[in-house]
Amino acid sequence: MSELPDIQARITAAAAKAGRTADDVRLVAVSKTKPADAVSALIAEGQLTFGENRVQEAQEKFPDLKAAHPALNLHLIGPLQTNKAKDAVALFDVIQSVDRPKLADHLARAQEAAERALTYMIQVNTGAEPQKAGVCVEDLPELYRHCRDAGLNVTGLMCIPPADRVSSPHFAFMGKLADELGLPHRSMGMSSDFEAAAELGATHVRVGSALFGARNYG
Ligand SMILES: *Cc1c(COP(=O)(O)O)cnc(C)c1O
């Protein structure tokens, strides 16, 4: 048995503190650096939502799994280069890391050409960290309008708070930003802080190492 039941129970308990239920918080199992076998093992336990941060790695792992499990739901949670937009659109169901207008334009063209309708989230750099992906808070409303006008179905926001800070204020802040834009989805919380996120309104928590064990890299 994996850590899955324990993680699910912790999500349920945290959500309940805020009067929410387990159905309100979807667990995205982050399988980066882990082999397809590890993914299959979780699928056998009923987990169908997975996250990967690199297109190429996902291409090596997921096409066969998706063919075998049509209900599998694959999220891209890492930075995306415009020249990989077409590949990403062909494989992923949700792209959580939209962070600039040019990328939105490439994704819009790619999904039109592929006749696929994905859903998208905009990644927000809530900590204003220079090296980190994500749109800065001031540019968020304009990027959201741009995505919508380009034809992307944006349903929410995603953030990765600064590693050396308490994440709760970032979760609360991102929730406020999503509220202002009328967006229902909030992807926030990782292995170290998914319970706080579930309590603060996360609709998606992205859990890797707590589920699969420590990574060697990534
Ligand atoms: C790797 C990763 C995660 C999962 O991290 P853990 O701490 O292992 O749970 C979540 N979100 C993003 C964007 C990641 O790259």
Image (cartoon, helix red, strand yellow):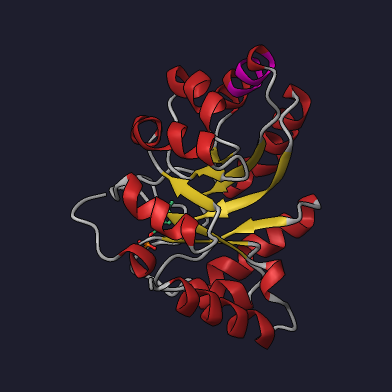
On the image, the x and y values in percent for residue 44 come to 48, 58
In what quadrant does ligand 1 lie?
Answer: bottom left
What residue is shown at x 47% (from left), y 71% (from top)?
167
Relative depth, front residue between 88 and 4: 4
Q: Give residue 166's quadrant in the image.
A: bottom left
Vertical side of 64 occupied by 213: above or below: below
Residue 53 can be seen in this image: yes
Number of numbered discs on residues = 0
Please tell me whether the stretch drawn in magenta is mainly helix, strand or loop: helix
What residue is shown at x 52% (from left), y 33% (from top)?
67
Relative depth, front residue between 81 and 35: 35
Vertical side of 140 occupied by 212: above or below: below
**Does the stretch in magenta take in 108?**
yes
* Left-right relation of 68 to 165: right
Q: Give residue 214's quadrant in the image.
A: bottom left
Q: Extreme right residue here?
A: 182
On the image, the x and y values in percent for residue 10 come to 52, 81
* Left-right relation of 22 to 89: right
The magenta stretch spans which residues? 107-112
**Does the stretch in magenta take in 44?**
no
On the image, the x and y values in percent for residue 138 come to 62, 45
What residue is shown at x 42% (from left), y 44% (from top)?
52
Residue 127 can be seen in this image: no
